[in-house]
Image: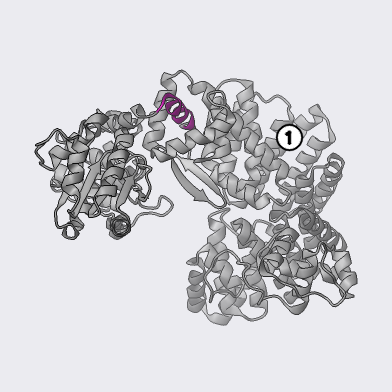
Amino acid sequence: MELTSFVGRRRELTEAKRLLSLARLVTLTGVGGVGKTRLAVRVAANARRAFDDGVWLIELGELNDPDLLADTVVAALGLREQSSNPSLELLAEHLADRRVLLLLDNCEHLVEAAAVLAETLLRQCPGLRILATSREPLGIGGEAVMRVPPLTVPDPDRPPLLQGLPGDDAVTLFAARAEAAAPGFVLSESNRATVTLICQRLDGLPLAIELAAARLRVLSPQQILDRLTDRYGLLTAGSRGAPARHQTLKLSIDWSYDLCEPVEQQLWARLSVFAGGFELDAAESLGTGLLAREEVLDVVARLVDQSILIREEAGTVARYRLLESLREYGYQKLREMGEEAALRRRHRDWCLQLVKQAEEEWIGPHQLAWITRLEQEQPNMRDALQFCVTEPGEDEAEAGLQIAAALHTLWLTHGLLSEGRCWLDRVLAHHSGQPTTERIKALSANAALAAIHGDLRKGAVLVEEGVALAAHLGGTGVQAIVTHADGLQALFGGDLPRAVASFEAALEGFRAEGDLMRLIEDLVGLELASGLLGDMPRAIACKEEVLAITELYGESVQRACSLWAFALAVWQTDHMHASRLLEQSVRLARVVDDRLNAAMSLEALAWIAAADHLDRRAAVLLGAAAALSQTVVGAPIAVPTLLTYHDECVRQARRALGMQVFDEEVRHGEAMTFENAVAYALGEEHRTASLPRADTATGLTKHERQVAGLVAEGLTNKAIAAQLVISPRTAQGHVEHVLTKLGFTSRAQIAAWVVERGETERTGSASPKV
């Protein structure tokens, strides 16, 4: 009988009931303390009517001898051993013609014996069904396995609202147990944030939440939260009636740890250095030395089977993570083994290798994959950077500079300017200050983020140090890097002629060094400054070079920036052309989740809308741009030269709509999500706002579909132009339209789409390649 209320688990109850109706053996798996037993007991109670001869709970947690398993079940069923037959035979005879549900609770330490018992009984007893709980599946034929997750917790990225908290099972459980421990406790505005953080810190793990709530007898919620940094010392007030391994969180995890093989225990400890999850290559990197690289997968799989590691889908790959409680436990074991410093250093080296590889492949067809990967690895990067700025030694300091400098593009595209600047400040302060290439790169990256952030004074100081170090160190590459940073200072400071001069000077250095990533960044800066000065030939030349490189390599981020920059140069004279450029830029920004560029493009689309007397649209776009940019830099107008256009747009729309209507439309735009704002800008608001889907050719014109087919055959733009008797520039335009309409960033994606769709439309003289 349950002594406390059962909380939540509606989805899990429904799924377990469904599985029990389909399979004769259902095993609920999950980490210790996740609530497998409570869920199984509730499922069994709900299913009682379906079993005429009863539902029987057999608790195996305290049984250590597998040879006594059948005897334990016999005793639980109240059978008298009236013959010398083995207990398993006695059970089979007794259950042969009965409709019974057996609940075998906590099988993990007896998994082989439990598997034999279950298989034997199920073969001989057609009316029998078994519901088991175990850290890992029993592994016999016909078994249905359901992994029990932690309770749902409030989203850490959104402020919790009091009225919505009861819908989160973890908070509901805490409140229920808190009221029992401290009568009179209620969720309120004053404690909602603290309770939410407690549940988040405890990963929604029911056992941990119940133990934490029990502490309200002597502590306040805030005191509990403050002490959760040492959760194993805090959570020791379990019920005396609970199994011994559940009386404290540490004992519960000790139970799981002791069941692991030594190599599993050691890998568990090593993997605890990862934060926020990891992929197999990361586990292999830290597992080598303990295991051969090819053996790591097998041990990882065993840890997943035993519910130590949680496996999650992340696009086309699997990621793994430890619940925070298990991670902290593993980390304590790592310290006890004396391997903490060595593994932290190996983790740092892995992060460094990853960002170096990402930097090398950033301009290429894998850019989107790298953006996703680095975004997922942000918690690991933060831990590595923290290690670099707290550990003494020049190696750590230099590694910190390299990691931070390599991440600056990701920080920029994802609007993490404040975080990026903070880390760059810290790694620079920790470094000795000696003139090294890595220090110059970090100084210039920090200056770039400061300029875009509007902190020109700090940026100038950083550039000044970079110039001095580059002069001392010498070399074309470092000179170009600091000169480009100075160009950004001039651009965002409103000094366009100086910006052009700096970008041009840096351009030659990047060409000489073959630094493709910085070359494209510099071309975009030169394109923007030249266009704003009215130097259209130079702006066009920069745009053409950027688009040619990005098309060749499948790059997206700078391509979107280039389209935006050129749109700013032409919007006053050609609204239609500028709108097309901005829409292409927005589509690419959506694909790479570049909210800063999206905000700037929405702002420019608002100017065009106001100039075309589409005043409501202009107001909505202004609001959407402002809301997006506030999460990044505070305003969508980072270049002072453009402020005039913003102010004129506001005056025009406000005059046409009136103050009240204008403000209402702006608020409408401000309330939009990123996806909805992009959909509105592109005229897709009637559809679900999501990433573009390439599952229809409806949006392509006849010529564009012909071009797509020719791209799939491997033809260049020049060859396509000759085939269709059009100019190369027109052919390039068609290719760009195909890319943006389908939401793609490379010709290879077009080719794959054509093959997948079986698209066969070609020009009359075109023939497929063999």
Q: Position of residue 632 (x, y in %)?
A: 56, 53
Q: Is residue 672 left or right of residue 491?
A: left
The quarter of the displayed image where residue 115 is located: top left
Farthest front residue in view: 84
Figure colour scheme:
one colour
Q: What residue is drawn where x is 35% and y is 43%?
A: 30
The quarter of the displayed image where residue 286 is located: top right
- Image height check: is 538 above or below 36? below
Quadrant of the snapshot with the C terminus: bottom right
Residue 189 in view, yes or no: yes
Residue 222 in view, yes or no: no
**Most foreground residue, 166 or 296:** 296
Q: Position of residue 263 (x, y in %)?
A: 46, 26
**Most foreground residue, 146 or 529:** 146
For mark 1, give the secondary structure: helix
Q: Is residue 266 magenta?
A: yes
Q: What residue is drawn where x is 55% and y is 67%?
A: 677
Q: Main secondary structure of the magenta part?
A: helix
- Image height check: is 609 above or below 12? below
Q: Position of residue 599 (x, y in %)?
A: 60, 62
Q: Which residues are magenta?
A: 261-271
Q: Position of residue 439 (x, y in %)?
A: 69, 31
Q: Residues within 10 Å of mark 1 (few under 14, many from 20)?
A: many
Residue marked by disc 1: 466
Q: Is residue 403 left or right of residue 341?
A: right
**Most foreground residue, 282 or 745:** 282
- Image height check: is 551 above or below 329? below
Q: Say what amino acid the circle numbered 1 marks.
A: Gly
Farthest top residue in view: 338
